[in-house]
Amino acid sequence: PPDEAATKIKRIRREYLGTDQVDERMFADPQLFKRGAGGGRGVVGVRVSDMFREYGVTMQRGNNDIKNGIVKVQGYMYPQKNHKNPFTGDGPAPFFYVSEHLTWFTDEIGNYIWKKDTSGEIADIPIDRNDHAMDMLKYMMSKRPNIANIIPQMLKQTPAHLTKWREIETTVDKRNHRHG
């Protein structure tokens, strides 16, 4: 329900941003801004985005253009010759990393499927199925500059705070490593 989801969103904002009051509205799937669930003519109802606003979570439409999102994300994932990995110092390196613990995310991206044309060749159109992680990533990158605008402005050296980042291993993680 929206009230529970809004509570979780606020908790995550407090945990990572130090506050649940954020000046910028979060990007959301444009479907959340349509009235009703049917999509037919004359459908009336409350928009999901309005339901969340009642609980203090404001949203804005994310860029839903698939090809634009793919190109932008590919730019961040492609190893750039003048960039070093902030964890290992090796290069060339991408600008986007995903934790191996986010298996829901890596599984979905690994299973992203492209349509095939009548001759069996892969078409430049993804199949619209099991793509929530891809949509999330596309919306997350909405306000990020294109990678071509970042590369000329790169720092000569990776800031120290980026090389010291690591995941915190929980007690559950430690038990799983010992037993399995």
Image (cartoon, grey):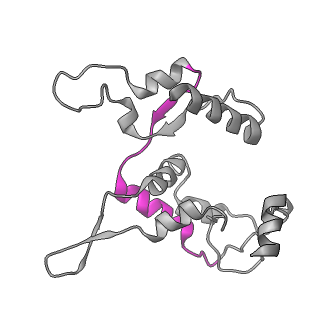
Residue 69 is covered by the magenta coloring: yes
Q: Which residue is depicted at the point 20% across and 81% down?
A: 120
* Residue 23, x across and y down, in percent: 64, 28
| Magenta stretch holds residue 25 | no
- Pick the residue in front: 159 or 53: 53
Quadrant the C terminus occupies? bottom right
Question: In the picture provided, is 97 more to the left or to the right than 170?
Answer: left
Q: Residue 158: tell me if it is visible.
A: no
Q: Quadrant of residue 175?
A: bottom right
Q: Return the residue nearer the eye: 52 or 24.
A: 52
* Left or right: residue 105 compared with residue 34: right
Relative to 157, is 92 above or below? Answer: below
* Image position, residue 90 (x, y; %): 73, 80
* Residue located at (15% from left, 82% from top): 119
* Residue 141, above or below 11: below
Q: Residue at x 59, y 76 (%)?
A: 79
The x and y percentages for residue 22 are 66, 30
Q: Residue furthest front?
A: 179
Q: Position of residue 122 (x, y in %)?
A: 27, 77
Q: Locate residue 173 relative to residue 120 in the image: left or right.
A: right
Residue at the spot 43% in from the left edge and 63% down from the top edge: 71
Asked whether residue 33 appears in the rendered view, the answer is yes
41 shown above or below 142: above
What is the magenta range?
Answer: 55-81
How many badges with numbers are in the image? Answer: 0
Residue 50, placed above or below residue 171: above
